[in-house]
Amino acid sequence: MMSKEASMITNESAIRKIALTGNIGSGKTTIARIFKMLQVEVYNADKEAHKILEYGTVKKQLVDLFGQKVIIQNSINRKALAAIVFQDKTMLEKLNSIIHPMVMKDFECWMKKLHSPKPYILFESAIIFDAGLNDFFDDVILVTAPQQIRVKRCALRDGVTQSKIWARIQHQTPEKLLIKKVNHRIVNDGKTMVIPQVLKLDKELCLRY
């Protein structure tokens, strides 16, 4: 069933909407950069969500929900917020219920600003399936990598302990289950070359749409 957030946007656009997803540390942003080099438009949902966190009305809701500890110098302390929601599934769901509708509304506005015809566009997000957005998209691309590699990547990138990364992973759908849900997969294990995979997939998507 399509989520409430997804139902906010009609599926009548001529632009084909492709989701690019992958669990934490899979390297989906790296893959998105390669698609951008091929002139594919990419909407980074996680990045836009960070901007939305700073909206005045949103900050007020978050303080009411999580307390003043999520505010530092009048901005959202994302590390403090993450420490809360990735230890409490209920709190994570409450946060998502605030942010997801606003992200989807912003995505709708972003699509309307695309002027030249595009065979397809990408919506990059880590939580396509967890948020119930998969039915909204015409296709889903999954980026995968071994769990140990993903943990190490995140620890280096975010400067947090591996135990905290493992805690976040527990709130995500296991990769082996995601693989069964998609038609397209890009392996980003540090050994398999990703550029040929992206080029092949781009050709397939352009021909299909």
Image: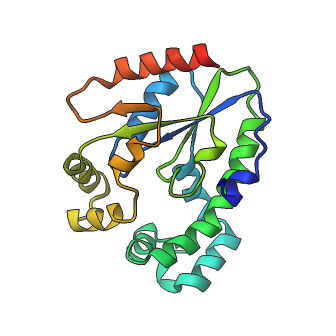
| Residue located 53% across and 50% down the image | 128
Q: Residue at x 27, y 63 (%)?
A: 166
Q: Is residue 56 left or right of residue 8?
A: left
Q: Quadrant of residue 162?
A: bottom left
Residue 59 at x, y percent in the picture: 62, 74
Above or below, comparing residue 198 to residue 176 in the picture: above
Residue at image location 33% in from the left, 25% down from the top? 194
Q: Is residue 52 visible?
A: yes
Residue 71 in view of the camera: no
The foreground one among 57 and 30 is 30
Indicate whether 161 appears above or below 158: below
Quadrant for residue 137, please give it: top right
x and y, in percent, of residue 103 in the image:
65, 54
Can you give x and y, in whole percent of width and height, for residue 175 in the image?
34, 49
**What is the x, y in percent for residue 55?**
66, 65
Q: Nearer the viewer, residue 79 or 65?
A: 65
| Colouring scheme applied when the structure was drawn | rainbow
* Quarter of the figure with residue 13: top right
